[in-house]
């Protein structure tokens, strides 16, 4: 699709690197892209609405930010942030930055980290640390450093960003995100309710795949719209 199934990072504008994506992640990506038909029309409408907003901001600024928010910044916001960063590279889109945060800080949960690893991402972190910095990569480069933090943490954007609420609790508890130019609700069910049950790994894998499927669909749509926009200017 759009030249992205080469299994390579497509260089963003001004960059010259090209590096391989982990083979398991390539396979996961192909499968998730082929499953776009599993996304409901109502959900696709929300994803397209967010993508259109990102496109609008792309035309107005050099860089624009997305901040993914859930209650504890432990599972869904990190997973969504990871897929968003990866999908931008997969489709060769530059000009966007991605962040995550919570209403409170806890830790990037080991079950979520393990599910991303099973999907094909490379991960590394110090298991002895209470709130570790987790290094996540689609291959060898880039490496994203993720740690649980509140959404107002200094590292997160204070302006020029869209807030995407990925859990219902955060969506209800945080009706206004200061500084955000827009706010979108894109909630996912919390896999934590299956912690320490026989279904734990299955439910975490389903969450990673669900979020990945939707984010890849959204960024794929965004890529198509960027191509159409560029063609119209010629």
Image (spheres, rainbow, N blue to C red):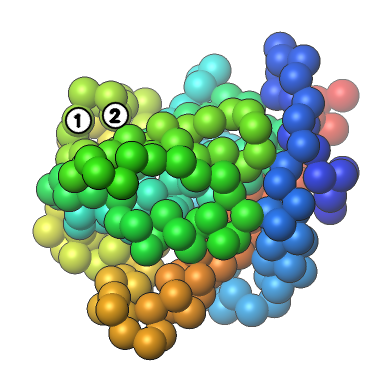
Q: How many marks?
A: 2
Q: Residue at x 73, y 42 (%)?
A: 21
Which residue is denoted by mark 1 in the rendering?
153
Residue 210 visible in the shown view: yes
Cβ atoms at labels 2 and 1 below 8 Å apart: yes
Counting from the top left corner in percent of width and height, residue 13 is at 71, 18
Which residue is denoted by mark 2 in the rendering?
156
Q: Residue at x 28, y 24 (%)?
A: 155
Residue 183 visible in the shown view: no
Counting from the top left corner in percent of width and height, residue 88 is at 62, 39
On screen, residue 92 versus residue 118, left or right, reads: right
Q: Residue at x 19, y 44 (%)?
A: 130
Q: Residue extending furthest front?
A: 128
Q: Residue extending furthest bottom?
A: 198
Counting from the top left corner in percent of width and height, residue 55 is at 58, 38
Q: Which mark is residue 38?
A: none
On screen, residue 128 versus residue 143, left or right, reads: left
Q: Secondary structure at mark 1?
A: loop
Can you tell which quarter of the image residue 34 is in?
Answer: bottom right
CA gap between label 2 and label 1 equals 6 Å
Is 3 above or below relative to 47?
A: above
Crowdedness of circle 2 by 10 Å Cα count: few (<14), some, many (20+)? some
Q: Residue at x 43, y 71 (%)?
A: 204
């Amino acid at each position: 699709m759009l030249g992205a199934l080469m299994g390579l990072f497509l260089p963003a504008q001004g960059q010259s690197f090209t590096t391989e994506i982990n083979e398991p992640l390539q396979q996961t990506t192909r499968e998730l892209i082929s499953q776009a038909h599993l996304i409901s029309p109502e959900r696709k409408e929300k994803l397209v609405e967010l993508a259109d907003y990102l496109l609008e901001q792309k035309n107005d600024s050099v860089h624009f930010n997305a901040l993914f928010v859930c209650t504890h910044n432990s599972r869904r916001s990190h997973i969504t942030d990871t897929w968003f960063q990866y999908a931008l590279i997969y489709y060769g889109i530059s000009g966007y930055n991605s962040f995550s945060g919570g209403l409170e800080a806890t830790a990037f949960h080991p079950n979520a980290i393990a599910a991303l690893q099973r999907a094909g991402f490379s991960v590394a972190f110090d298991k002895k640390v209470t709130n570790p910095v987790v290094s996540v990569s689609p291959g060898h480069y880039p490496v994203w450093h993720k740690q649980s933090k509140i959404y107002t943490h200094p590292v997160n954007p204070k302006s020029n960003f869209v807030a995407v609420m990925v859990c219902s609790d955060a969506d209800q508890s945080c009706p206004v995100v200061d500084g955000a130019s827009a706010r979108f609700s894109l909630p996912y069910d919390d896999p934590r309710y299956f912690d320490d049950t026989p279904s734990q790994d299955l439910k975490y894998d389903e969450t990673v795949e669900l979020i990945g499927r939707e984010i890849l669909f959204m960024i794929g749509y965004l890529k198509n719209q960027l191509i159409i926009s560029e063609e119209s200017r010629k």
